[in-house]
Amino acid sequence: MKKKIVVAVTGASGSIYAKLLLDKLQQLQGQIAEVAVVMSDNAKQVWEFELDDTTHGNYPFKTYAKNDFMAPFASGSARFDTMVVVPCSMGTLGRIASGVSDDLITRAADVILKERRRLILVARDTPLNLIHIRNMQTVTEAGAIICPAIPSYYSKPKTIEELAMTVVNRVIDLIGLENESYRWEGI
């Protein structure tokens, strides 16, 4: 069954993860029924600053405004199976943990959780304070998956993009899509 996926991009540093995820989802379109994208205003600014480009609006996915509560995934009846917040700021994570649905990102996350579907939060901040850790515990107990943007090195990445892809490939695995990527075979 093809996946319906929401990709939410917040203003946390780490736009490379969002870009590489959207690039990968384009490549895997045969396994996907729909991808919906929502970005915060800060996300667009950080993307342009960190990546020196404005390609965030060039993907073949439907994009929704941050306050568009008429977006299909603002309701459980639209049956989106997965939502990825990448990168996920601690402010967004805190609002999700508190049940505050003050924009489309937090409303969609609330819907995904209440429908017992897959919510993947690619947390990017460091170091963490106790509030962050407790918020992560709260969303985990509610059914979300915390996937910190911590790259792996055993594939011996040579570029920043290859390093960031180690995180994106984990996200693709968590979504449940078939993906060709490095797999640990031991030493």
Image (spheres, helix red, strand yellow):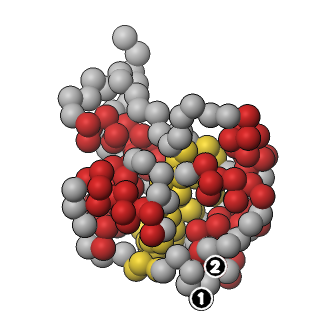
Please name whichever residue, 92 or 64, is drawn nearer the observer in this view of the structure. Answer: 92
- Report helix, strand or loop for mark 1: loop
Q: Mark 1 points at which residue?
A: 70
Residue at figure coordinates x 56%, y 84% from the top left: 68
Q: Where is residue 147 in the image (x, y as percent from the top left)?
A: 55, 42
Vertical order, 60 against 152 (above or below) = below
Please name whichever residue, 144 or 67, is drawn nearer the observer in this view of the structure. Answer: 67
| Circle 2/circle 1 CB separation < 8 Å | yes
The image quarter containing residue 119 is: bottom right
* Count of marks overlaid on the render: 2
Residue at figure coordinates x 59%, y 74% from the top left: 104
Q: Can residue 31 be seen in this view?
A: no
Specify the amino acid type for callout 2: Ala
Vertical order, 187 against 146 (above or below) = above
The CA distance from mark 2 to mark 1 is: 7 Å
Q: Name the residue under label 2.
A: 74
The image quarter containing residue 82 is: bottom right
The image quarter containing residue 165 is: top left
Q: Relative to residue 49, is residue 1 drawn left or right?
A: right
